[in-house]
Image: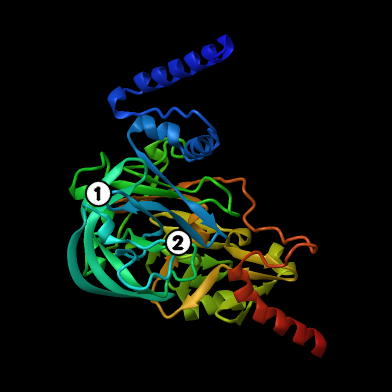
Amino acid sequence: MMTPMSALVFTALLGCISHAAMSSGAEMSKYTIPVFKSNPAPLQRQLRQFLRTGGESTLRSGLDTESLTNSHNTHYYGEISIGTPPQVFTVLFDTGSSDFWVPSAAETCEKSRCYDSKQSSSYVSDGKKMSIEYGSGAMDGFLSNDTVRIGQRVVIKNQLFGEATSHLSTRKRPFDGIFGLGFPSLTEYMTPPLFTAKEQGLFERNAFSFHLTKNENEGSAMTLGGWDESLVKSEDSIHWVPLSEKSYWKVPVESINMGDLKLETIPAIVDTGSSFLIGPGEEVERIAKLVGAFPTHGVYLVESSKLGSLPSLTFKINGKNFTLPPEQYIAMVEGEYAMLGIKPSDIEFWILGDIFLTNYYTIFDMDKEAVGFVDLNSAEPAIPAPLPTAEPRLISRVAKILFSPFLLIRDLFKRLF
């Protein structure tokens, strides 16, 4: 039985909800308010996360928000669904590729969640073979067509996607598939989902944006249909960079400097699917030599005692300097050594991955054909503090893979010297 006090609180709550909806200009018929008879804790957690990632301004502006999970500052992934009724998957939102795929139930399912076309009334067969190679894995499978849902209310109909029957790229990762956000020219298999959404007129502004947090903090999110106005106070604060190529989100770079070192000026790809800054092998080797780092197992390590004296790394992009002090380009500290968040490759451009993007709110505008950057001025410490000695020394499976061989090498050096 409802007490007078609980009735008063319930009435006040309904009044606040009604006032917020009417003052925002929203149509009341568009919103359903869930009423729970029992434990409301799950809803409260979802509401806190929604508001934490800019949900209030999203409702007012007609945007949509996709909350992301930060896994060890190396992967940022969120949930989408495919089919009718929806089958839910976690995907890596990747501006460095354009294909969209999830594991298939058509053959042996190697993940806990696999798409089953037999369970979807909106499924349309395609069957074309699909095969993709990534820098860190590969995928083989076939194409299918179904309804895709992303965020709170974006529904993309008749979307082609891949059913992966083999997928080395995500087998041991915390996400199920890849959600490509690059341009259509980068794939031979499909129109990428957000470009399909653009064709279907689902967004008021054909843009999406990312806020990627550091140190596994909550609050990472992708905003659909524009940007989060709680982080971008005005469009004047956005530094727009026109693309030099419409395949990747590739931008021209005017200069790259570290201290007195001037690096070769080449374009850069803005890539939410890459964890690190990645550059041509010779250029990264010059950086490593400057800071006194040495290579091991595909990464560079530097003595922790040198961190305070390392120079900053600056990319000049469309007239603006994007400067990363050492605490922002160091990926991890473990005891006496730290790992550079800068990796070499055989590519002829730079990849501005999450090490770079966690310092800026980043907007990808499909109509403007430009990338926008907004300084976050985050107070978060950029370098994770070492774990106490009483705790396990390494913070993740990734760290174990990277550092275990190095610890053996370090012990060997201690014995020799």
Q: Secondary structure at mark 2?
A: loop
- Where, by quadrant of the figure, is residue 337 drawn? bottom right
Q: Residue 234: x, y in percent?
A: 40, 35
Graded by Cα atoms within 10 Å as few (under 14), some (14 to 19) or many (20 or more), the crowding at tag 1 reads many
- Where, by quadrant of the figure, is residue 335 drawn? bottom right
> Does 351 sit left or right of 342 as displayed?
left
Quadrant containing the N terminus in the rendered view: top right
Q: Secondary structure at mark 1?
A: strand
Q: Nearer the viewer, residue 277 or 107?
A: 107
Please report whichever mark, 2 or 1, sits nearer to the chain's N-terminal start. Answer: 1
Q: Residue 332: x, y in percent?
A: 63, 65
Q: Residue 175, which numbered label? A: 2
Quadrant containing the C terminus in the rendered view: bottom right
- What's the amino acid at mark 2? Phe
From where the camera sits, is residue 136 visible? yes
Q: Nearer the viewer, residue 31 or 136?
A: 31
Residue found 52% across the figure and 13% down from its top? 7
Q: Residue 409: x, y in percent?
A: 70, 84
Mark 2 to mark 1 CA distance (whole Å): 21 Å
As drawn, 222 above or below 56: below
Extreme front residue here?
A: 1
As drawn, 254 above or below 232: below
Q: Residue 156, which numbered label? A: 1
Graded by Cα atoms within 10 Å as few (under 14), some (14 to 19) or many (20 or more), the crowding at tag 2 reads many
From where the camera sits, is residue 135 visible? no
Residue found 48% across the figure and 19% down from its top? 13
